Amino acid sequence: SSFQTLHTKYQEWRDVLQKRLEFSAQLQLTVRATYSQWLLEQEAAFQDFLRTFGGPTLSLEEFRKLPAEDRVKLNKAWKEWTALKAAEEKEARCQRRLTEIATRKRYKETLKLKERAVKELAEALDQSDLSVLRNALDAATELGLDDDVYEVAQAKVRLALLDSAEAQLNDALDQDDLEKL
C-alpha cells in the first residue's frame, strides 16, 4: 500500500536527517573544543612572552583595558616574538633532522664495518693462522660483535683449540718428551 511506502520513506528520511543533525552537532563541538584549545595555547604563549621581559602577566580583560597605543605596541612585539620562536623551533627541527641523519649514517658505517669484520673473521678461520685469527677476532670484538655471531663463536673455539695444541707442543718441547708429540 502506498501509505506504508510513504510512511517508510518518511522514517528513512527522518533517520537520515537525525544522523546529519548529530554529525553537525559533533562537528560543532569538535571545532569549538579545538578553538578553545588553540586559545588556551595562545594565551599560555602570550603569558610566556610577557614573562620573558619580566613584565607582569595580563589577563585578556586587563589587556583589553590597556590604552590602544600600548595594545598596538604589545601586539607588534608579540608578533615579532612569535616569529622569533617559530624560527627557533624551525632551527631546532632542522638540527634534530641533521642529528638523525648523522646517527643513521654512523649506524650504517658501523654495520658495514661489522660485516667486513665478520667476512675477515671467516677468511681467517679458513687460513688457520693463529695470529691472523687472533687479530681478526680482536677487531670483531672491538666493534661489539659477540658470541651470538657464528663466526665469532667459531673463532673463539678454534683459538682455544689452537692455544691448547700450542701449549701442549710447548710443554712437550720444554720437557724434551717426544712421546707426547
Image: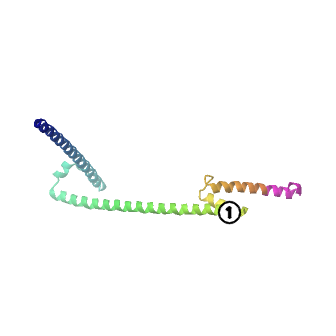
Q: What secondary structure prevails in the magenta region?
A: helix
In which quadrant of the rendered image does the N terminus lie? top left
Residue under the point 88% across and 55% down: 179
Q: Is residue 38 left or right of residue 106?
A: left
Residue 55 seen in this snapshot: no
In which quadrant of the rendered image does the C terminus lie? bottom right
Residue under the point 30% across and 53% down: 48
Residue under the point 44% across and 60% down: 100
Q: Is residue 70 magenta?
A: no
Q: Which residues are magenta?
A: 166-181
For badge 1, the amino acid type reads Ala
On the image, the x and y values in percent for residue 117 come to 61, 62
Image colouring: rainbow
- The residue tagged 1 is 124
- Give the image quarter of residue 99: bottom left
For this rendering, which residue is in front, 35 or 120? 120
For this rendering, which residue is in front, 118 or 79? 118
- Give the image quarter of residue 68: bottom left
